[in-house]
Amino acid sequence: MEKKNLPSVDEIKSLLLHALYLNKDDGYCIETKKAYVILGMDFETSDNEINEIYPSGLNKFQTDIRIAVERLRKENIILDFKDSGRGIWKLSPNGIIEARKLYIETFKEDPHESQDEITKSDIEQIEKENNFSEGQKKNRLSSYYERKGKIRT
């Protein structure tokens, strides 16, 4: 069996943008664990290739994906984890437009045909609907007076 090389970072970036763009119903975002599986299947990598380790002990496939994601963040195509949530990669408003261009350039069609142009109001609506916060703040009262409303005598 011939050994295939892992995909390049540019190939990973391209396919990741396609996967994010196709997740319109989820707000153009994807969980990182799901992305690793999707990319592994799309590149037809074997388990041995996916589990290949650098001498430093890091997983090669996951490291290359993280490098691609970091480059997309620097290009303002994927939101920072502070804005999208931990463990979630989400397209920025600029990223949605870039991913759409790339998808149409690659496949000569838009999977979201009913929408001719993505407008700023559409992007704002998506951001309002998909707020991935890490948890809620709780209001806790710290003293007896705050809990009961009485002053000690």
Image: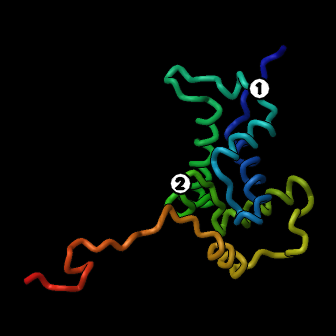
Q: Is residue 149 above or below residue 35?
A: below
Q: Disc 2 residue type?
A: Arg
Q: Earlier in the sequence, mark 2 or mark 1?
A: 1
Q: In the structure shown, which secondary structural element does the residue marked by tag 1 occupy? A: loop
Q: Quadrant of the N terminus?
A: top right
Quarter assignment of residue 40: top right
Give the residue at x 90% y 54%. Answer: 107
* Residue hosting label 1: 46
Q: Position of residue 48 (x, y in %)?
A: 71, 21
Mark 2 and mark 1: span between their CA atoms?
28 Å
> Which secondary structure, mark 2?
loop
* Frontmost residue, 134 versus 37: 134
Residue pictured at 73% horizontal, 53% vertical: 17
Along the line of sight, which residue is nearer the eye, 100 or 126? 126
Quarter of the image where the C terminus is located: bottom left
Above or below, 70 against 103 in this view is above
Residue 72 position within the rendered picture, expressed as x and y whole percent measured from the top left? 62, 53
Q: Residues within 10 Å of mark 1 (few under 14, many from 20)?
A: some
On residue 61, the disc is none
Q: Which residue is mark 2?
A: 86
* Residue at the (58%, 60%) spot, across then down: 79
From the viewer's perspective, tell me whether residue 32 is left or right of residue 152: right
